[in-house]
Amino acid sequence: EVQLLESGGNLVQPGGSLRLSCAASGFTFSIYNMTWVRQAPRKGLEWVSGITGRGENLDYTDSVKGRFTISRDNSKNSLYLQMNSLRAEDTAVYYCARDWNGLDYWGPGTPVTVSS
Amino acid sequence: DIQMTQSPPSLSASVGDRVTITCRASQGISIWLAWYQQKPEKAPKSLIYAATSLQSGVPSRFSGSISGTDFTLTISNLQPEDFATYFCQQYNSFPRTFGQGTKLEIK
């Protein structure tokens, strides 16, 4: 059974940093592209970043370029999102998802709140 | 970036009804469109990929169609568990983009 579980969400002050993790199981992690999607309170879904299976190609939405870094450790079946220079508008639930036939599996999400 | 315009923003219907939700892409995305269902406080669930293909385990009352850059999600014979918010997403190019969502409510 495919499972994704995010962790690392927290309350952080503006300008601070957080590192989100996503633990994957139930599939061959290294052959799948992976994605981070976020959802601000009472808002829609926003694609944040994606990474290919071997980590050779990375993409970001414009609003996080230069501040967020996506990475993966295939030996640990884990996906990461390093978030720096956080802003109030980064407040959201962050989901990791497997990028296959759209986004076929999603984790339950981890909440990030940026506030002083 | 490709813009996805989803309509309507909300929809009221009754159990047993047939409803349609539409997404229009600002440029060509071939068939690379997915539909998701999201219930309150839950992660989205994938329903349809490649515009018309049903994900495994999704009931056959859900269907997708395509006409040029217009994509439609149809739910036939609405069931109580179908009342939720629906999103489309293009995955033809980066950045991937979502529609604004359609909230389907019970009439």
Image (cartoon, coloured by chain):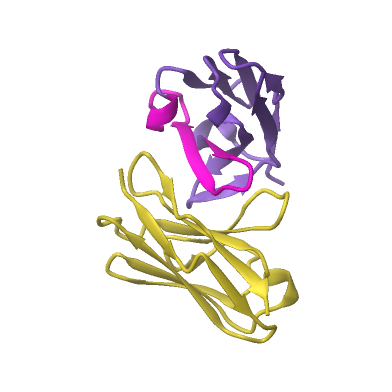
Chain colours: A purple, B yellow
> Which quadrant holds residue A73?
top right
| Place of residue B93 in the rendered image (x, y in percent of width and height, measured from the top left) | 33, 44
Q: Quadrant of the C terminus of chain A?
A: top right
* Residue depicted at x 25% and y 55%: B27
Residue A23 makes an appearance in the image:
no
Read off the magenta span: A36-64
Query: Front-most of A28 and A43?
Result: A43
* Residue depicted at x 62% and y 52%: B44
Residue B105 colored magenta? no
| Place of residue A63 in the rendered image (x, y in percent of width and height, measured from the top left) | 42, 29
Query: Front-most of B54 and A31?
Result: B54
| Place of residue B84 in the rendered image (x, y in percent of width and height, measured from the top left) | 66, 64
Using the image, determine if residue A57 lies above or below residue B36.
above
| Place of residue A31 in the rendered image (x, y in percent of width and height, measured from the top left) | 50, 35
Query: Front-most of B18 and A74?
Result: B18
* Residue depicted at x 37% and y 30%: A62
Using the image, determine if residue B47 lies above or below residue A92.
below
> Which quadrant holds residue A41?
top right
Using the image, determine if residue B42 lies above or below residue B7.
above
* Residue depicted at x 46% and y 18%: A67
Residue lying farthest to the front in this orientation = A116
In the figure, is residue A64 to the left or right of A13? left
Using the image, determine if residue B98 lies above or below residue B5.
above
Query: Front-most of B105 and A54?
Result: B105
Residue B84 makes an appearance in the image:
yes
In the figure, is residue B50 to the left or right of B105? left
Residue A54 colored magenta? yes
